Amino acid sequence: MLASGEVSSVELLEHFLERNSSLHNQINAVVTLDVERAKELATASDRRRANGEALGVIEGLPMTIKDAIAVEGVRSTGGAVELADHVPDEDAEVVSTIKAAGGIIFGKTNLPRWSGDIQAFNDIFGTTNNPWDLDCGPGGSSGGASAAVAVGLTPWEIGTDIGGSIRLPAHFAGVCGHKPSFGIVPQLGYIDHVSYGLTDADVNVFGPLARTVNDLELLFDIVNGPRRDRENGWRLDLPSARGDAKELRVASWLDDPDCPVSEDVSVVLEAAVDAMETDGVTVNRSARPDIAFNDVRTVGQPLISAATSPGRTEDELEALHEIVSDPSADETLRMRAAASTMSHRDWLLLTEKRDRNRRLWADFFNDFDVLLAPVAFVGAFEHQHEGTLYTRTLTVDGRVRPYSDLIVWTSQFGYVYLPSTVVPVGLTKGGVPVGIQVVGPYLGDRTTLEFARYVELLLGGYRVPPIALI
């Protein structure tokens, strides 16, 4: 529409601002706006288009960015009170790349403190609601991003994902999300602790959320590539998809006794795979990598906890040391505490186990092209702000489950650096969205996107939440 002149950049920006004004009190997704500068940039973009001088493929497209990503001149907090008034003096690399392609950043979206929860609330901006059920959260940590995309406050978003923070919000809010292979989208400028910005967090990635898979791939193509300090010696040349979607070798792993999937979600996932088989796709439902499922608890989640440890305060670290030395402490809490305070030697030994598992996944993907899996064992759940990721519980199908089980199915693939594309496949009987993970081999991002596009076409993909029909 921008390219054809059907709409101007200024008009499109005004459209998104009006939608935000109409829905903000109900959703609370876009928490910081940069209106005046965005209007100036949109006006300049329209002038360039009129003169045939468009900067790039998204010239003049207004969009928002998760508040865990630094944007020059715009309050960027990471959801932490320590940075409540922080205004970066330079962009994260991914932001500068988007701007170079013509994109206009007009706002920042909500998240939990240091991106450390499956919801989007913090002491600065409050709580973001799920557009499908305002009593529930839109997932996290990129929950403001998923809610904003779902109700059309922004065309697409860049989120971050270390334990599922792109994939879980896509699932809960009913949009598409892509977690890239680790290391192929620069993440300098990630606000995960006070002295952020100079290193890449292990496991973490930056990636797109959007309403369609085509939009995911377009934004992914803009932001992937080497870090700026490596451009003189490195380039990224991702392999093409391994074939057309219906030619791919497909496996599914839709449930596991270690982290059972709720009946509501299971019904939708099984129906999705049934529909693929009816459409002529052969799905192997029993193939598994030669890896114990619960390695995610003993290897994956400790590595993730270690990667997020820079965000811990000194008081928090002292409390974690006390938990480690308390034999009566909850097992999951002790794991988190030990992982957040582990020695470099212990981290290296865990990394060795991770590398062994990466080889086993590579062996699996010699025989298969994609693996279908749940995103989470439940759909959207009611806001729950007391306690922490490791102390809360959820009651599902009459059983009390650890809240931390929410990140098991996403961490399973994230800690071994695999790409995963999430696409909506239906609604539960309670009327909330369900997404499916399409996982592929390392650097097989084109393959997961290709199959996700097929699933979207077969099952309908994104649906407009009723609240967004304004």
Image: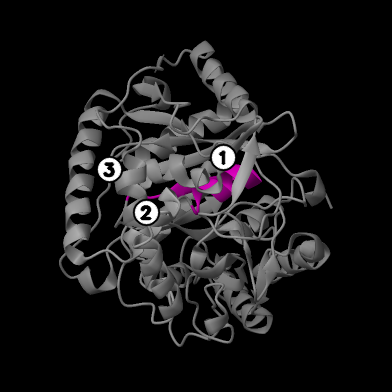
Neighbour tally class for label 2: few under 14, some 14-19, many 20 plus, Cα within 10 Å: many
SS class of the residue under badge 1?
A: strand
Residue under label 3, please give it.
442
Q: Is residue 104 visible?
A: yes
Give the side of residue 312 with respect to residue 147, left or right. Answer: left
Residue density around tag 3, few if under 14, some if 14–19, many if 20 or more, within 10 Å: some
337 and 73: which is toward the camera:
337
Which amino acid type is marked by label 3? Tyr
Residue at position x 58%, y 25% from top?
266
Q: Residue at x 50, y 48 (%)?
A: 404
Disc assigned to residue 335: 2
| Colouring style | one colour
Instruction: Tell me what residue is drawn at x 33 percent, y 60 percent.
Output: 338
| Closer mark to the observer between disc 1 and disc 3 | 1
Q: Looking at the picture, how far across and down is residue 155, in whole percent?
A: 62, 57
- The correct choice, above or below, for 265 with respect to 389 in the image is above
Q: Secondary structure at mark 2?
A: helix
Q: Which residues are magenta?
A: 165-181
Q: Is residue 419 visible?
A: no
Q: Residue under circle 1? A: 401
Q: Is residue 439 placed above or below 417 in the rendered structure? A: above
Looking at the image, which is closer to me, 345 or 444?
Answer: 345
What's under tag 1, amino acid-wise?
A: Arg
In the shown orientation, is residue 62 left or right of residue 20? left
